[in-house]
Amino acid sequence: ISAMVFAGCEKNEMQTEAQNAAAAHKFKVEKGMLVFNSVQDYDATIEQWDAMNVKEVCSMQKSMGFTSLYSTFSDRNDLAAIPAEDRFFALLLSEEQAVSIEGVVYTVNFENETITATNENDKTSLQFLFGDDILTQGYENSEASEKGTCNPKRISCIVEGKDGWVRYYKAGIYFSLYSEFDVEDSGTEADIWNMKTHSIGQWENYRGESATIEFDLKTTVSSSQNCPDLYISIYKKSSRLTSYTVSVDYWYSIYQFGGGYETGDFENVYNHCN
């Protein structure tokens, strides 16, 4: 009897925790996916999670009974297999690659770069391309793909297995501009990496929102079995960009296991669309 009572209490505590988590955020979990009542709630959640550690986001999601596409791959240590080039997008999608916004379920097909929008009331569906600004133009506007100027770009600078880039990513209901510095696994047990970056630029989207950015970021990591990287978020919203200009400088130093020291830099990794 005591075991049954304990299990019941634990379940109630878990339900209460999930309810409290839902109340603190601008979404709920239904049918295994995130449900947002408005585009504004969706954007607010993107902004909130962008300021958090990914592990914190995954932990919070699981406390609400939600398993994201990101967690599906993370749980089996296979992040490289996530189909979204910007892995953050996978945090918003269910295992079936879907999310509900304003009564419409958006199902993402990464292979074909299409999104199927299904109205939950009348079950009618429309299909869009990744380049469509679906949530700005309205999901019933099938002409959205003809609107827009900026196309996806990835500007890279690669030197001896070290890769620094600025990337503009489009996915119909999610658009991002970000920079990343990545290295190949050195195979050593514990290289110590010191990395820093300086970013400057500006952007404007189809809603008329704009911003000028300038910031510095630095980190120290041990490579061990994982390749260190430095991810810099510049823009994440549900509306595509009309223009942007970004320049990023990277500097790094490596203290190698067993002796050795290396320094280097990538200056003016530049990406723009005007």
Image (spheres, helix red, strand yellow):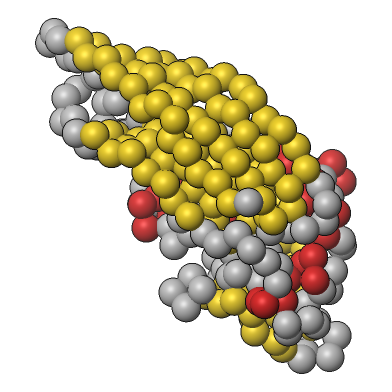
Q: Position of residue 12 (x, y in %)?
A: 78, 48
The residue drawn where x is 43% and y is 35% is: 269
In which image quadrant can residue 117 be found?
bottom right
Q: Is residue 245 visible?
A: yes
> Between residues 50 and 267, which one lies in front from this camera angle?
267
> Between residues 127 and 52, which one lies in front from this camera angle?
127
The residue drawn where x is 69% and y is 56% is: 242
The residue drawn where x is 65% and y is 84% is: 127
**Residue at far front of view:** 274
> Between residues 57 and 66, which one lies in front from this camera angle?
57
Is 259 placed left or right of 250 in the picture? left
> Between residues 160 and 114, which one lies in front from this camera angle?
160
Is 198 placed left or right of 42 in the picture? left
Q: Is residue 16 visible?
A: no
Residue 67 position (above or below residue 124): above
Q: How many marks?
A: 0
Residue 126 position (above or below residue 198): below
